[in-house]
Image: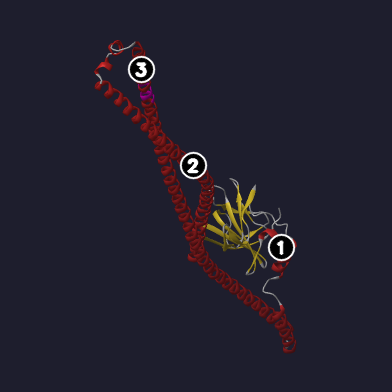
Amino acid sequence: MRTLKAQQTQLEKTIKSKQREMESTQKAVKRGEERIHDLGVRLEDRVQHIHTLEGELETLNAEITVIKDSLAELQRQLEEKKARFRRAVKMTRLYPKVKSPLLFVLSAKSVTQMYRRLRYTREYANYQYTLGQQIQERQAETSLMRDRLVSKRTQMHGVMNELVAERKKLTQEQLTKQKEVKNLKKKQKDLAAEVNARKKELAALNKKIDDLIAYEIEQARKKAEREAAARRAAAQKAAAQKNAGKTSGAASGKTSSAASKSSSWLTPEERQLSGNFEANRGRLPVPLTGPYRIAAHFGQYRVEGLSHVTLDNKGVNYSGQAGARARSVFDGVVTAVFAFGGTKNVLIRHGSYISVYCNLSSVIVSKGQKVKTRDIIGTPANDDNGHPLLHFQLRKETAKLNPEVWIGR
């Protein structure tokens, strides 16, 4: 019995630990999903940014094409001007007299020819000057266009590099977050499976424990019936000796036999105690002194986030403040004081009702001792948070009752 109790306690601790880990994992999954959602929003912004960059690239490519065309036209014009300039220089070299404009003018044969040569010299000089200016302008424009082309290409390369980096970063973040959430969900699934397995194991152990308790109660019932039969036999013997008559004795024995079949295994005092207990339904005192809160309710409850996994609490867990003590909820007799899992436990019988006080670090009552309502029976052990924790059960023979229906507020 103690071994099963110890295994049950260890399993309950394991399930609670796994449940806390699972709840923490669920929160991590939720946070991961929220981060993925936020990342999705940011990714949409980045996608828009990428589209903007792609638009800028198209614009830059168009501008570069225009600049290249303009540069090609300027280059063509520049080459044309240079060709004209070379022809003018070549012509000057072919006519040595033209090299000296004054000599060219004075060597005219007539005044009319002199004026014509003078006008030609001026026009030719202006032509050379204008051609030189045009060449310089085209060279400047060509140089500016080349600078603009280099700048646009540099800008385009920067945008392309940024675009590639954004796409790479975007893809990496997506893969990282998806992998993280996938791992968390797998961990959550594994924990759920483990909790479910532990829960089934605990249920099997609880059944064995309940069977043992039922067996012990049945043995107590049979013992009480044997004692009652012995008392009846003694009473019959005493009556027979007093009356000294077989007929009287046979009639008495028949009546007693009928009474034996119809009577309960409880004594009259125990039946009265059971009735008083039932009369106080909903008004029994809380089995823990001082301020308290219910840390776990009676019955089955679903594990948060796992609709297919349930845990079963056979009683109610009361969490108190420092200095809290466990106390009897009604008049009765201590029928058992036993230890398992490092704590002590007390069973008190109130007729056909039994109250159970578990997780006690110390006990001040002993088996067979009579107690009154609100009598202190021991000190609850502290939970992981340092608060006194009492596990309280209530039964009518082997039937499990919900203590919250019987305990007052």
User: Where residue 363 sits: x, y (%)?
Assistant: 56, 55
Q: Residue tagged by mark 1?
A: 277
Q: Which amino acid does label 2 sit on?
A: Gly
Name the element at disc 2.
Answer: helix
- The scheme the figure's colours follow is secondary structure
Of badges 1 and 2, the one in the foreground is: 2
Q: Name the residue under label 3.
A: 120
Name the kind of residue labelled 3 in the image. Answer: Tyr
The answer to whether any part of residue 327 appears in the image is yes
Magenta part, dominant SS: helix
Label 1 amino acid? Phe
Choose mark 1 or mark 3, whichever is in front.
3
Q: Label 3, label 2: how many angstroms apart (C-alpha)?
A: 57 Å
| Residue 68, image x, y percentages | 40, 36
- How many numbered callouts? 3
Q: Which mark is residue 1?
A: none
Is residue 53 covered in magenta?
no
Residue 55: which disc? 2
* Residue stretch in magenta: 132-137
Q: How far apart are marks 1 and 2 (CA)?
A: 85 Å
- Residue drawn at x 50%, y 44% as measured from the top left: 51
Residue closest to the eye, 150 or 171: 150
Count neighbours of disc 3 (C-alpha within 10 A) and say few if under 14, some if 14 to 19, many if 20 or more: some
- 1 or 3: tag closer to the N-terminus: 3
Q: Position of residue 236 (x, y in %)?
A: 70, 81
Is the residue 1 above or below the residue 71 in the image?
below
- Marks 3, 2: nearer the viewer: 3
Q: Would you say the residues marked 1 and 2 are in contact, meaning their CB atoms lie under 8 Å apart?
A: no
- Camera-nearest residue between 271 and 138: 138
Q: Is mark 1 on a helix, strand or loop?
A: helix
Task: Kindly indicate the quadrant of the structure image that contains residue 263.
Answer: bottom right
Q: In this view, does 94 lie to the left or right of 272?
A: left
